Image (tube, grey):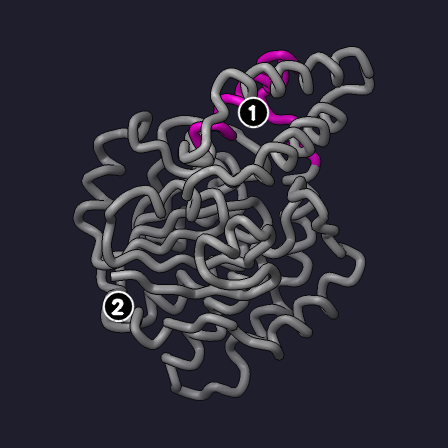
Amino acid sequence: MKVHPRCTYCLLSRIHMEAELSTDDEELVHEAVRGGIEVLNSLYEPGIPTAALSTPMHRKAYAILNDKDPYREKKELSSMVAERFLPAIRSHVFNGNGDDVAATFKHAVLAAVIGNYFDYGVMGLEVPIDIFERTFTEHFKRGLDIDDTDRMLDKLSNVVYLADNCGEILIDTLVFEMIKKMGGNITLVVRGAPILNDVTMEEVKQFGIDEKVDRVLTTGSNAIGVCLDEAPQELKDALDDASLIISKGMANYETMSEENYRPIAYLLKVKCDPVGEDIGAPKGCSVARLIG
């Protein structure tokens, strides 16, 4: 995905947010924002990939703040909330379908997509933690706005799953469970180091998620989404060999849509207009789109 002019002030808003998460020192917050503006001024050009701007802007802010993980408390909160409500979410997914694996897989994907809605730092998006269950139920009843799940069923033998945020990764395990039930293998891919509220190997091991998949790889760095220039060869080989790549969330969409891997399924909640315009679904839509 190419950068949109609206991405610029959203990125600066997120840098402001993470700076305030990291420190109470107002001058340091100003310095972090100024650093983001400097990178924006030096790199912004129409037509560049979004992550070519977002990654260096966040890295600059982290360096100024001298903080490798300003979202640590938000990550813990989102994991706590997802863990608390996972039994209720599971009941939505697995109740009422009987032996219909296609319907259950669709519901697991829907739950995972709804989980992507509960994000921190997207400008204009409020995360209604206090009404999580009610909000989840409303979105679940609405269903997927773009639904290619039936076309994914014969492609699940060797899945590479690109994870997104903490918290929602626990809901993703319901998709893992269905893929395993249908005989598929899963390579889970997480960030190589903390960036935003994305899941890393630390959280995967903390919640035993590594035991629910066949192997876990990392992107090799803290780049936004997947930066293949910084990715280990093992990940590149896994992408080449996949029967299906499942790309979770907007950051992975922004980067993987710049590549030619096929087939690839994008699972995400559209949380901003530029992504919505690029993927062809209005803001607020629940998307499970298969390409290739």
Question: Does the magenta portion include 27?
Answer: no
Q: Which residue is drawn at the image coordinates 70% and 50% (left, top)?
A: 125
Q: Which residue is drawn at the image coordinates 58% and 58% (left, top)?
A: 115
Q: Nearer the viewer, residue 240 or 86?
A: 240
Rendered view: 14 above or below 169: above
Rendered view: 167 above or below 60: below
Question: Does the magenta portion include 58?
Answer: yes
In the current view of this chain or complex, which residue is farthest to the front?
A: 46
Mark 2 and mark 1 lie on one chain; the one further toward the N terminus is 1
Count the numbered circles shown. 2
Q: Amino acid at mark 2?
A: Gly
In the picture provided, is 160 more to the left or to the right than 240?
right
Q: Which residue is drawn at the image coordinates 37% and 72% (left, top)?
A: 149
Magenta residues, start to end = 51-73
Q: Nearer the viewer, mark 2 or mark 1?
A: 1
Magenta span dominant secondary structure: helix
Q: Circle 2: is it few (<14), some (14-19), or many (20+) Cα within 10 Å? A: few
In the picture provided, is 13 more to the left or to the right than 92?
right
Query: Measured from the top left, where is residue 3 in percent x and y?
Result: 48, 37
Query: Measured from the top left, where is residue 224 in percent x and y?
Result: 47, 34
Q: Which residue is mark 2?
A: 183
Q: Which residue is mark 1?
A: 58
Q: Circle 1: is it few (<14), some (14-19), or many (20+) Cα within 10 Å? A: many
Q: Which residue is drawn at the image coordinates 27% and 29% (left, top)?
A: 232
Q: Amino acid at mark 1?
A: His
